[in-house]
Image (cartoon, rainbow, N blue to C red):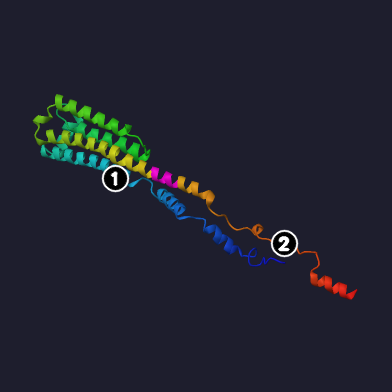
Amino acid sequence: MYVERSGLAGAPDGEEESGGARCSTPLQSRVDSYEEMQKKKCISDVRRTFCLFVTFDLLFITLLWIIELNVNGGLPKQLNQEVLHYNYHASFFDIFLLAVFRFAVLILAYAVCRLTHWWAVAVTTAVSCAFLIVKVILSKLLSQGAFGYLLPIISFVLAWMETWLLDFKVLPQEMEDENRFQSLLDASAQRAPFLPGPVSDGQFYSPPESVADTEDDLDDKLGLI
């Protein structure tokens, strides 16, 4: 008896390739799509929002300082008085420099170096709070009108908002995304050994032709004798 091999082992290569392609599961497709998305994104959405808020901090403090300069006697005159003839007890220039310090440290740490720890924002917030508290106590800003209250308070609040945003939004969200991706990888790795492999020619074969004579052949030979 012969086993028909042409219908099994003689299957074209396209069918074998399609059998291998069927091994790719929806789970693996999700992992691949997530990896592709991470390659396209240089930075996560929530971290980008944090960097935008840090930039807003610098621009807002700068705007308030420029308004204060114009209100108190004109920009050229006040720049000369507050920058070139800096006085700790009466100048707002150091509050502007404090905003520049926060911007430089936070952008370098969380946009350029992409740190996943809170120490950088803790340093900027601690330095800002200590400096502003000491300045309000020792300086004469409170006697200079509304800006003497406005600039220190807003700078203090923005520094703490940056800490809150990073510690309660950015880092937990990125950790959750990382854990979700790791769970997908683990599930894909556990399921991979159970997936069927491509069909090979060795799985189908034809038995060798029997050398034994059939009953009809034996009858023919006996009849001739």
Please tell me which residue is depicted at 81% across the width and 67% down the height of the picture.
Answer: 213
Tag 1: Cα neighbours inside 10 Å, few (<14), some, or many (≥20)?
Answer: some
Q: Please say whether residue 183 is one of the residues in the magenta stretch.
A: yes
Tag 2: Cα neighbours inside 10 Å, few (<14), some, or many (≥20)?
Answer: few
Q: At label 1, which amino acid type do we have?
A: Thr
Q: Earlier in the sequence, mark 2 or mark 1?
A: 1
Q: Which mark is residue 150?
A: none
Does residue 160 show up?
Answer: yes
**In the image, residue 220 lies at what x, y percent?**
84, 74
Q: At label 2, which amino acid type do we have?
A: Pro
Q: Please say whether residue 79 is one of the residues in the magenta stretch.
A: no
Magenta residues, as a range?
Answer: 178-185
**In the image, residue 218 lies at what x, y percent?**
83, 70
How far is mark 2 from mark 1, CA to CA? Answer: 70 Å
* 214 over 204 or under it: above or below: below
Observer-nearest of 176 and 101: 176
Left or right relative to 219: residue 1: left
If the image is split into quadrants, where does the C terminus sit?
Answer: bottom right
Of discs 2 and 1, which sits in the foreground?
A: 2
Does dot 1 land on a helix, a strand or a loop?
A: helix
Residue at the limit of the structure toward the bottom, as seen here:
224
Decide: marks 2, 1 in contact (CB < 8 A)? no
Residue at the limit of the structure toward the right, as seen here:
225
Choose top left, top right, bottom left or bottom right for residue 64: top left
Choose top left, top right, bottom left or bottom right for residue 95: top left
The residue indicated by pointer 2 is 207
Q: Which mark is residue 49?
A: 1
